[in-house]
């Protein structure tokens, strides 16, 4: 008689996954790539005062978030300091250009071959974007007097080339994970950086809470747990649109009509993290520009000093504009992605229809109406996550919560996607998976 296991479901599923040779090999390969990434994050480049660099990132919300995503690679000014952000930027640019440029739109409709060509263009676009971002980062550090000494042209060129090579290498590592490991490689790289930097953020939050208000630590934990639950709910939330299919088959000299039903899952948060990144970059732009023109401390303030003070992350004006921009970008990016999916035409080509809705334009109007309604809830969710650090600081007095909510959103999303892939692998082998 087989003995029934008393292990928790998640633990048993992990044991089952590691007991399969091919799945175990994929998991270990993914972990090995993450070890290589973490090793590169601690190989520094010359010419920068790391102490001043750390202070600059602590006071800058955008660079602080990017540093958290890189697992501290920016504060150590490593060879992978700019991470895979140029690749993410290139992917976003290509997504926005595909429906605008006829040639790219034609490539997107050529199936796997067209996708391969678009992916190649994306990779080529990464190189100039990485060089531009590396030079911009170095120029900003020089403007903030963070460099140790004046850098020569050859030194600047070598640093930028090394940064570009580091980005390309990380993209290659991510694609290796996608091909031979578990999960989406680029997302796993970002996830690895967040997990590596999150313990320090949490530790600083706990120390700050204990040393400050007595109830700060309790409020910190409650808000973190509530935020985690909210993120999981909204990441998995979707609206099911019922679809019926009618097909005709010819058998034994007679025509038979067959029908089937399924649904289209429209996600509440279709845009993912993109609106927050767009809004954060736009909100940091005025403050960054003002640092080049404002009068120094002790001199009479000018117009740019006022701009710098308004666009500080701890002001209500900044957070209000940030909240509104996240909602606006969420609607914009969702509609762009939804238009590229072209669901009404796909349904019509597959003899599918939504019950009670005419095919063609009526179906397009109906789906657009639904996606706008559910996107409103998703946009409010993203905006709330974006300003949650500001709210948490006002409630708990714990300043270390500055970027935890954004990092948690990405980490939870990547973890759920990876677990679903493991679930699919185990289900094919008739094991119980991670998810019910």
Image (cartoon, helix red, strand yellow):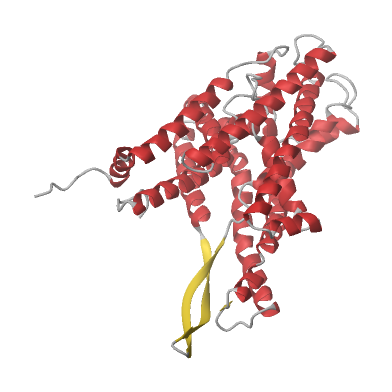
Figure check: 337 above or below 174: below
Residue 18 in the figure: left or right of residue 59 = left
Question: Is residue 397 something one can see in this rendering?
Answer: no
- Does residue 428 appear in this view? yes
| Left or right of residue 430, residue 371 in this image | right
Residue drawn at x 61%, y 24% as measured from the top left: 73
Which of the 4 image quarters holds residue 57? top right
Image coordinates for residue 130, horizontal then vertical, percent? 74, 31
Q: Residue at x 68, y 28 (%)?
A: 82
Residue 198 image position (x, y, % from top left): 51, 31
Quarter of image, res 304: top right
Within the image, what quadrant is residue 77 found in?
Answer: top right
Counting the numbered discs, the total is 0
Q: Quadrant of the C terminus?
A: bottom left
Q: Position of residue 405 (x, y in %)?
A: 56, 41
Picture layout, residue 233 above or below residue 61:
below
* Residue at image point 75% right, 58% down: 105
Judging depth in this view, the residue of 216 and 313 nearest the camera is 313
Residue 96, placed above or below residue 257: above
Task: Please provide percent x and percent y for residue 124.
Answer: 74, 38
Q: Residue furthest front?
A: 253
**Relative height, residue 55 to residue 270 (above, below):** above
| 350 on left or right of 149 | left
The residue that appears at 88% across and 23% down in the rendered structure is 295
């Amino acid at each position: 008689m087989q003995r029934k296991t008393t292990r928790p479901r998640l633990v048993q599923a992990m044991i089952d996954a590691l007991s399969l040779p091919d799945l175990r090999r994929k998991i270990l390969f993914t972990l090995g790539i993450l070890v290589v990434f973490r090793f590169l994050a601690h190989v520094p480049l010359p010419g920068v005062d790391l102490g001043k660099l750390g202070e600059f990132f602590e006071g800058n919300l955008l660079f602080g978030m990017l540093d958290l995503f890189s697992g501290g690679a920016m504060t150590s000014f490593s060879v992978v300091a700019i991470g895979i952000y140029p690749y993410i930027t290139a992917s976003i640019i290509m997504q926005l250009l595909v429906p605008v440029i006829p040639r790219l739109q034609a490539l997107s409709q050529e199936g796997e071959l067209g996708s391969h060509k678009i992916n190649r263009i994306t990779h080529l676009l990464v190189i100039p974007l990485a060089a531009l971002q590396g030079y911009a980062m170095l120029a900003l550090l020089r403007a903030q007097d963070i460099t140790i000494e004046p850098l020569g042209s050859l030194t600047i060129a070598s640093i930028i080339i090394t940064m570009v090579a580091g980005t390309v290498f990380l993209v290659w590592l991510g694609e290796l994970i996608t091909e031979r490991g578990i999960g989406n490689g680029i997302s796993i790289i970002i996830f690895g950086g967040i997990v590596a930097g999150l313990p320090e953020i949490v530790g600083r939050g706990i120390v700050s809470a204990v040393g400050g208000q007595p109830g700060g630590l309790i409020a910190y934990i409650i808000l973190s747990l509530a935020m985690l639950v909210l993120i999981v709910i909204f990441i998995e939330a979707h609206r099911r649109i019922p679809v019926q299919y009618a097909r005709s088959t010819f058998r034994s000299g007679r025509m038979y009509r067959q029908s089937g039903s399924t649904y289209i899952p429209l996600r509440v948060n279709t845009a993912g993290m993109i609106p927050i990144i767009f809004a954060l970059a736009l909100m940091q732009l005025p403050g960054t520009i003002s640092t080049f023109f404002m009068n120094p401390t002790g001199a009479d303030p000018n117009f740019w000093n006022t701009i710098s003070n308004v666009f500080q992350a701890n002001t209500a004006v900044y957070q209000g504009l940030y909240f509104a921009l996240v909602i606006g970008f969420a609607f914009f990016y969702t509609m762009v992605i939804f238009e590229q999916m072209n669901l009404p035409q796909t349904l019509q080509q597959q003899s599918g229809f939504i019950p009670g809705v005419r095919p063609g334009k009526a179906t397009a109007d109906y789906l657009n109406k639904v996606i706008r309604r559910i996107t409103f809830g998703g946009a409010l969710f993203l905006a709330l996550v974006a300003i949650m650090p500001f709210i948490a600081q006002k409630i708990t007095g714990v300043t270390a919560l500055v970027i935890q909510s954004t990092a948690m959103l990405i980490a939870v999303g990547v973890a759920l996607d990876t677990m679903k892939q493991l679930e699919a692998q185990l289900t094919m082998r008739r094991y119980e998976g991670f998810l019910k």
